[in-house]
Amino acid sequence: MTMQNDAQAAFIESARALKNRAVPSQSLRVPTIDPERRQRSLQTCHRYAATERPRRAVSPTGNGYVPELAARIEDDPNLTDGARRCARKLAELTFRQNREGRVLPVTVTYLARALGRCRRSVQRYLRQLEEGGYVAVEVVASPRSRMCIGLMVRLLAPLLAAHHRQSWPQSAQNPGATPESLNHRFRLLFQGKACSMPVDQWALRCMDGVFRSLMKTKPLTVLPPVHLA
């Protein structure tokens, strides 16, 4: 057996060559430690930062609370943290305003202000919750113009806890008080003359004006192309 075919001899030869190429330990530069700097670091490492992070004022929410929800929204990997927070805010507002119907009349601007996010982020949160089957969103069209005045968000069964899917516990009310007051005049506007429709139908309605303008300028656009022989 030759030297080239012996694996052990080849390993010994490569180890010897590596040892010869290694730099002697005397030539390595060991960084010196400043004792004063080390002592100062040990004395101040446990202290707070000199400039603390500014804190925002917390809005007084009173005695409101979020009702019990299903743990599914916490385990759903398709939802972001913002979408989960939006679901909790929707459940809180619905529990406070409409426990029987579980339908919340709300605007995107109000949700953006309540969550501290922009309107586009709130729209993404609602789209994620709608795709996951947690809420159903409908657009409320204005009876006076072709613009929308808000949304009707309905809480669905997958969002609610199993023991509260049928109904929520009712709140203590004054039997002598009137059910309708001026505090709910904007909510009555949603439920009155305005009509609600799904988001896809609202998108088609918004594109009707553009389509009519296109037909006036280029009426032959929708016709199939004619191939001349």
Image (cartoon, rainbow, N blue to C red):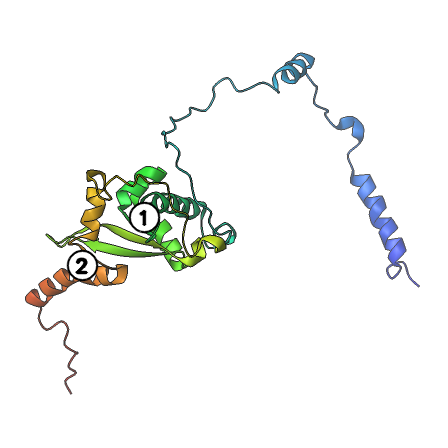
Rendered location of residue 221, percent (x, y) = 13, 71
- Type of amino acid at the residue the image marks with label 1: Asn
User: Residue placed farthest to the left in the image?
Assistant: 216
User: Residue placed farthest to the bottom in the image?
Assistant: 229
> If you read the primary sequence from the N terminus, does the residue marked by circle 1 or circle 2 appear first?
1
Report the residue marked by disc 1. 98
Rendered location of residue 215, percent (x, y) = 9, 67
Foreground pick, 171 / 31: 171
Would you place residue 91 above or below residue 50 in this image?
below
Q: CA distance from mark 1 to mark 2?
A: 30 Å
Label 2's element? helix
Report the residue marked by disc 2. 206
Q: Residue at x 89, y 54 (%)?
A: 9
**Quadrant of the image containing the N terminus:** bottom right
Residues packed near mark 2 inside 10 Å, few (<14), some (14 to 19) or many (20 plus): few
Lateral position of residue 7 relative to residue 76, left or right: right
Would you place residue 221 above or below residue 179 in this image?
below
Would you place residue 89 above or below residue 191 in this image?
above
* Any part of residue 161 in sight: no
Foreground pick, 225 / 50: 50
- Type of amino acid at the residue the image marks with label 2: Cys
How many numbered marks, from 0 up? Answer: 2
Q: Residue at x 42, y 39 (%)?
A: 65
Rendered location of residue 196, percent (x, y) = 22, 57
Q: Quadrant of residue 138?
A: bottom left
* Any part of residue 33 in sight: yes
**Quadrant of the image containing the C terminus:** bottom left
Marks 1 and 2 in Cβ contact (< 8 Å)? no
Which one is closest to the eye, mark 1 or mark 2? 1
Rendered location of residue 110, percent (x, y) = 28, 41
Q: Residue at x 42, y 44 (%)?
A: 85
Disc marking residue 215: none
